[in-house]
Amino acid sequence: MIIIFYVSLFLYTLTMSIIANVVDFDLWARVVVGKTFFQTGKLLNFDFQSFGPTRQWFDHEWGSSLVFFQIVDKFGDFGLIIFKAIIIFITLVILTKIILLRRKHFQTKNANNSKNTQNAQGGEISNAKKQNPFISAPFNIIFFILLTQAVLEVVFATVRCNLFTFLFFAIWLYALEKSRLEGQYKILWTIPITMIIWANMHGGCFVGLGLVFLYAAGEFLNKKKFMPYLLVLALSLGAMFINPYGIKYVYFLFHAITLKRSAITEWQPIFHKIHMFKFLKYKFWAGAVAIISGVFLVKKYCTIKNTLNSTLNPTTQGETPANGFQNLKALYNSLDKTKALILIVMFLMSLKTLRLIPFFAFSAAVFLYDDIYKIFNKKLPNAINNLKEIFVFLLILISFCYTLKTVPIQTTLKGYPYVETEFLRLNNLKGNLLADFHYGSYLAYRLYPDIYIFMDGRYEETYEPGLLERLKTIHIGENWKEELNRQHIDFIIAEKMYPLYERLLDDKDWKLYAHSKRFALFLNKDIKLKSYKNPPLDFDYYNKNKWETKIDWSVAR
């Protein structure tokens, strides 16, 4: 049955990866960085595509750029989607390995503490599977479906550099858990070694550092070995200095994690006013996990209370039942502080910012899976569990086949201003373009060197502080015209949802030339077009040619 589980998990992961196929806003910039490196042997340290004020750039995702460019160059859309599915699947598989690791440890521990009970049930049990019935029990695929649905909008949404962070987080969690449960501290050497890769793939490596610190603090509270984790933490910090930029790179990473990013959606709290009715799947999932954990703690408290009181005889002079403080102290002593710290901290961090949602989800899956498994499966015969898994597998297989039939394995430009971009390309226009920073990477990829952008999604890395606020003022601010006039802008792609669109319609300095359902292209009044070509309306045309660009360093200019 375990094979059916993993096949189901892979098919489900692949299905969701095919469906969630919108290209990430920053992927275009990543491809440019990778292309530049493989064609010139150099890494970019400035944004050559922007007309706005820029600064020296320390690219903390340069390693991911090399991978993404090779995938796009060799395999195109198909490669991107399959790559995403494989990385997510491997991440989930590692989580199941941690669950099995914990299951084996605690089942063996319980077996050693209850030999008399085992003998009474049929003699000494020598077979490992009989000693540990949960080890061979199938995973509950429904649990992992709920898990992936909870983080769907953050994990599956697109191909992004944080895929590597999810993978390395799972690898580190496995190494850390194996070291403390089995005392195999040599495996901790994998952490600083992999940090060399992680720190050059994505700035999310700080989540890994936080995880190691929580293990050190938790094992200290558990009164067990904690120094190995502090040593690994120090070595991992040192490993971050192995990068193409040196100490300035590490300084930038530490600076980046202190930025507020209040204007960036994915860095906002999950209960921010604009997210109150979003991410509902995760909110229900996390709420259910919190409730189950609370019920578990209450039940454990009651058990401890009854156990303590049963050891005392109230009828004996001088003896009284245990008080609440004693009960809480006993509960605290019985808890795994490392587990508790990780779950509490990751839960609170997931509330603080959307970006950290997956790390609580992954941690909860690892540390609470068997607790939930016992609640919902302890009374079900194995035959029923097996039938349930087979039934769900068939449903997933049917869904996968239907998806292959109805959805092409390719990324999509849905949500991009592709019509307006094509207008500029078709008519060979040259100048400076202003648009929301989300689309800057795509616009620069498609339009450079004829057109320069104001800024893209790498606002914290490449641009002067305050540039994002200027862009925000132009789009929704009261003093938008004054700020706009400070910039030398020839073209504007405005989203119809922002006040800027209506303002430009009424402004004599700007003229509407092309528009789609969501966007509109305005040209400065000083640009006179006696005639122009209108872009085609066929979406397949744009999707087919989306990776075409004039950026090519192998061609002498």
Image (cartoon, rainbow, N blue to C red):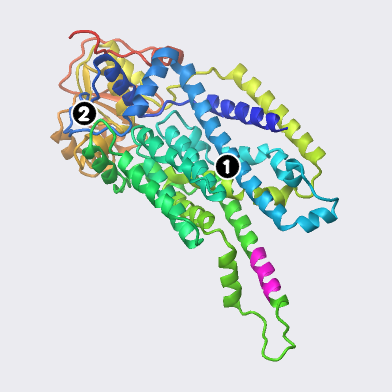
- Residues 528 and 50: in front is 50
Report the residue at 51% width, 61% height from top: 222
Identify the residue position indicated by label 2 in the image: 45
Tell me which label, 1 or 2, sits earlier in the chain: 2
Crowding near pointer 2: few (<14 within 10 Å), some, many (20+)?
Answer: some
User: From the viewer's perspective, is the residue at label 1 or at label 2 nearer?
Assistant: 1
The part of the image, by quadrant, that contains residue 485 is top left
**Amino acid at the residue labelled 1:** Ile
Q: Quadrant of the N terminus?
A: top right
Against 543, residue 232 (above or below) is below
Which disc, if any, is residue 449?
none
The residue shown at (21%, 39%) is: 248
Q: Is residue 538 magenta?
A: no
Q: Which residue is labeled 1 in the image?
A: 98
- The residue sitting at 20% across, 43% down in the picture is 479
The Cα–Cα distance between marks 1 and 2, rounded to whole angstroms, is: 40 Å
Quadrant of the image containing the C terminus: top left
- Which amino acid is tagged 2? Asn
- Residue 337: image location, x then y, percent: 52, 59
Which segment did they paint magenta? 299-308
Q: Would you call the spot at circle 1 few (<14 residues within 10 Å), some (14-19), or many (20 or more)?
A: many
